[in-house]
Structure formats: structure tokens, C-alpha cells
Image (cartoon, rainbow, N blue to C red):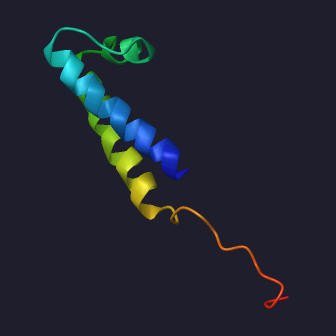
Amino acid sequence: MKSLGMYMALAGIISIVLNFMERNLSILMWIDTWGETIGWGIRIGLIVIGGALFLMMPGGEEEEPTQEDA
């Protein structure tokens, strides 16, 4: 889930940057069909939700029990 959050936030940031150059990610072309305001809301939502997933999920590797712990 942590990597999903990172990819969501990254897609939102890239979409904002590309929007200023009159372009967009092909997977996110649909977000402006309901208007520019809704499109900006979706982009910001991607960043906020993606960042929350990234920050709230537990970190990387889990420790495996050793023979001494068993």
C-alpha cells in the first residue's frame, strides 16, 4: 500500500506539471471531462490521498522470527 500511495501522489504531481504545458498523462485524460475545477480537485485529491497512504502505512521490511525467538 505504501508504494501505491507513492505512485498516486507522483501521478498527481506529474499531472499538475503537465497541465501547465497543456498536456496530461494518458491514464488521467478523463479527469478534465467534468470541467477544470473538478480536474484540479481530482489532481489534488490524488496527492493528498497518496501522501496519506504513503505516510500512514508501516515501513518497509518486517522482521522474520529467528530460531531463538521460536
Identified at 39% across, 47% down, the residue is: 49
Residue extending farthest bottom: 68
Residue extending farthest left: 20
Where 54 sits versus 12, above or below? below
Q: Does any portion of residue 9 appear in the rendered image?
A: yes
* Rendering coords of residue 13 (x, y %): 27, 33
Where 1 sits versus 10, above or below? below
Q: Does any portion of residue 38 appear in the rendered image?
A: no
Identified at 36% across, 40% down, the residue is: 9
Identified at 79% across, 90% down, the residue is: 69
Res 41 → quadrant: top left
Answer left or right for 27 relative to 31: right
Residue extending farthest front: 67
* Rendering coords of residue 56 (x, y %): 45, 63
Answer left or right for 5 relative to 1: left
Where 49 sits versus 26, above or below? below
Answer left or right for 38 relative to 52: left
* Rendering coords of residue 27 (x, y %): 45, 16
Foreground: 9 or 62?
Answer: 62
Quadrant location of the C terminus? bottom right
Res 52 → quadrant: bottom left
Res 46 → quadrant: top left
Foreground: 15 or 32?
Answer: 15
Q: Tag count in the figure?
A: 0
Identified at 44% across, 37% down, the residue is: 7
* Rendering coords of residue 19 (x, y %): 20, 17
